[in-house]
Image: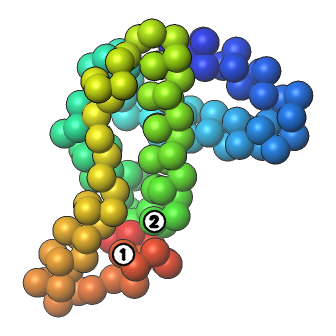
Amino acid sequence: FFNDLEASTGRARANPKKASVAKAEKAIIDRYLIPFFDNATITSFSEPKLYEYLAWRKTIEYPARGAKIDRIRREASALRGIFEHAIRLGYLKRRDVPQLRLGAYIRLEEAACDLLGSRSPALTGSGTWL
């Protein structure tokens, strides 16, 4: 699957804007998605596993501060692109794509911080995600 994705990234190089996006998404895939999901098939991705990924990402890059929420949003966008690619190749049907409700997840994190008295500006979209 990732070989097919790599080939489409190569085709995107003809358009500079698409090439830039493809390069950024390839970096996200290599740095975060492959290490976390390891050898899992795209059909084995589940909604709980996506939320496990979010929890892992909060600790992996900057353990003391958390990852920047804007970066997490870009990663979620890359993940959506991977699912769209899998649909185009016939690996998945649209109805089988797990939903990642990032906004709802962030609101839950904000509520937890409020309860603990440690509200983070990161959860509003700026700074880091704790």
**41 in relation to 96, above or below:** above
Q: How many marks?
A: 2
- Residue 123: image tag: 1
Figure coloring: rainbow
Q: In this view, does 1 lie to the left or right of 123?
A: right
In the image, what residue occupies the spot 29% across and 26% down? Answer: 95
Residue 65, percent across and down? 40, 71
**74 in relation to 124, above or below:** above
Dot 1 or dot 2, earlier in sequence: 2
In the image, what residue occupies the spot 33% across and 71% down? Answer: 130
Amino acid at the residue labelled 2: Ile
- In the foreground, 96 or 130: 96
- Residue 69: image tag: 2
- Element type where label 1 sits in the image: helix
Residue 75, percent across and down? 50, 47
In the image, what residue occupies the spot 78% across and 28% down? Answer: 12
Residue 74, percent across and down? 54, 52
- In the foreground, 41 or 99: 99
Marks 1/2: CA–CA distance: 7 Å
- Residue 100: image tag: none
Amino acid at the residue labelled 1: Leu
Residue 41, percent across and down? 35, 15
Q: In this view, does 36 lie to the left or right of 44?
A: right
In the image, what residue occupies the spot 15% across and 75% down? Answer: 112
Kindly tell me whether residue 100 is visible in this rendering.
Answer: yes
Q: Is residue 18 left or right of residue 85?
A: right
Kindly tell me whether residue 34 is visible in this rendering.
Answer: no
